[in-house]
Image (cartoon, rainbow, N blue to C red):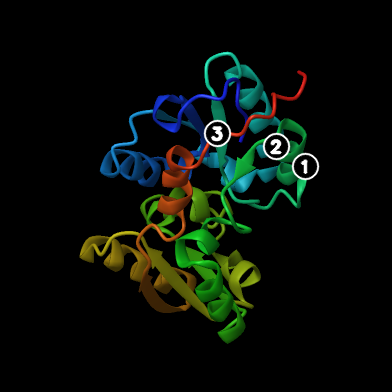
Amino acid sequence: MTSRVDAPASERRVLVVACGALARELLEVVRNNRLDGIDVECLPASYHNTPDLIPDAVAARVRAARDDYDEVYVGYADCGTGGRLDAVCEELGVERLPGAHCYEFFAGSAAFAELQDAELGTFYLTDFLVKHFDRLVIDALGLDRHPELRDDYFGNYTRVVHLAQVDDPDLTARAAAAAERLGLRFEQQVTGYGELAPSIVRLVEAPAPTRPLPSP
């Protein structure tokens, strides 16, 4: 986190610069916990497929927010940046969500490690990815045009696990259909928001840091 002034937690203005794939969940957390001092701004969810764009985009928005917010928090996990996002966060003095990706903080670190250890060939879906499966998986991989490539992409996978943020029969059915389309076994775990909610709530409960912002 960064801080312009040592203001009481209830008076601080906080910006969460987040992945567009988390928009609904973040806004729910803010609304349900009445976190009036937190604003959420989302970068394009398409960065899921182009993680090299994430560090520079996050850095630009964090720098632009310095005059308007007391603190800035990064609503991304590492998300495939190979540590580059952590380097940006360290340089700018901000924190990010815990874990390597959204699957980990939705499931919880320990539970996700168990899922991975039990079956390495697992393809994960969140509610967002279920809703946008055609665009972010089928179209992005060219399977709409070349369905014969399915086994090239997914031949080493054995199952799809839907980490569900809400228990919605329609989303469950769509996730199962996605698994069938990939030729994989389907499983579901209802995770809720996992570590997302406590990470955001902590922003207004913790004392503000007193260190100055890094130089532009």
**Mark 1 burial class by Cα count in 10 Å: few <14, some 14-19, many 20+:** few
Find residue 179 and report its horizontal and vertical position in percent.
Answer: 42, 71
**Res 158 seen here:** yes
Residue where numbered disc 1 is placed: 87
Q: Which comes sooner in the sequence, label 2 or label 1? A: 2
SS state under label 2: helix
Q: Which residue is rendered at x = 45% and y = 32% of the image?
A: 9
Give the quadrant of the C terminus: top right
Q: Relative to 113, does residue 42 appear above or below in the rendering?
A: above
Residue where numbered disc 3 is placed: 208
Question: Identity of the amino acid at label 1?
Answer: Ala
Residue where numbered disc 2 is placed: 55
Pick the residue in front: 86 or 136: 86
Q: Relative to 68, does residue 144 appear above or below in the rendering?
A: below
Question: Identity of the amino acid at label 3?
Answer: Ala
Q: Which residue is rendered at x = 49% and y = 67% of the image?
A: 108
**Are the two marked residues, 2 and 1, in contact with CB atoms closer than 8 angstroms?**
yes
SS state under label 1: helix
